[in-house]
Amino acid sequence: FLPHLVASMEQVEETYIMVKPDGVQRGLVGDIISRFEKKGFKLTGLKLFQCPKDLAEEHYKDLNSKPFFPKLIEYITSGPVVCMAWEGAGVVASARKLIGSTDPLQAEPGTIRGDLAVQTGRNVVHGSDSPENGKREIGLWFKEGELCQWTPAQAQWLRE
Ligand code: UDP
Ligand code: MG
């Protein structure tokens, strides 16, 4: 039993980030990926994907009683999305900060939504809201074999 190993494994957290169809159509994919890359998180999955309706409904199932749900499903399935899995200690909460508030008009400048969007119904990006949902959503959007485990060359320059 190696407590230090267990502790370091517990720090590994993963989040599901997705550039929504408006972000793809508006040519914002590179900018959005770049923000997570430059921050220092590790990309473990990436693909361009046309989301089927049943997957969109499963992904957003907690919202299925909301009045905006049908329009949300229409939006998410309206064109290709970019699916990403990112890994790192604290990545879930940090990614939510980088993304900014759900309503882009309330999102702080410097955040993705604060810089790049004007309306909740076209807020360009998704990020998991908890480590549990990070795991759940990566499991929904990626098949086994689509994720890569690797050690970035810069690892020793990101953490002491
Ligand atoms: N949404 C919407 N109208 C609303 C609230 C949410 O169209 O009044 C959409 C929006 O695209 C949002 C998504 O539903 O990003 C999921 O809502 P949630 O409250 O989980 O916001 P998020 O976690 O994306 O910030
Ligand atoms: Mg959410």
Image (cartoon, rainbow, N blue to C red):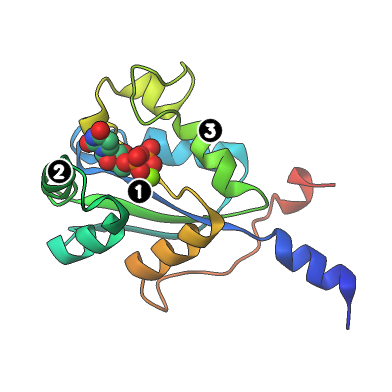
Q: Residue at x 89, y 78 (%)?
A: 2
Badge 1 is on which residue?
18
In the picture, measured across the screen, residue 57 lies left or right of residue 115, that is left
Q: Residue at x 32, y 59 (%)?
A: 47
Badge 2 is on which residue?
75
Camera sees residue 23: no
Camera sees residue 57: yes
Crowdedness of circle 1 by 10 Å Cα count: few (<14), some, many (20+)? many
Is ligand 1 less than 8 Å from the beta carbon at label 2?
yes
The numbered mark, 3 or 1, whose residue comes first in the sequence reads: 1
The numbered mark, 2 or 1, whose residue comes first in the sequence reads: 1
Is ligand 1 less than 8 Å from the beta carbon at label 3?
no
In the picture, measured across the screen, residue 56 lies left or right of residue 134, that is left
Q: Residue at x 17, y 58 (%)?
A: 50
Crowdedness of circle 2 by 10 Å Cα count: few (<14), some, many (20+)? some
**As drawn, 103 above or below 12:** above
Q: Which residue appears farthest toward the bottom when viewing the image?
A: 1
Badge 3 is on which residue?
97
For the N terminus, the quadrant is: bottom right
The image quarter containing residue 102 is top left
The image quarter containing residue 136 is bottom left
Observer-side mark, 2 or 1, equals: 2
Residue 63, image x and y in percent?
A: 27, 50
Dot 3 falls on a residue whose secondary structure is helix
Residue 160, image x and y in percent?
A: 85, 47
Between 86 and 61, which is closer to the camera in this rendering? 61
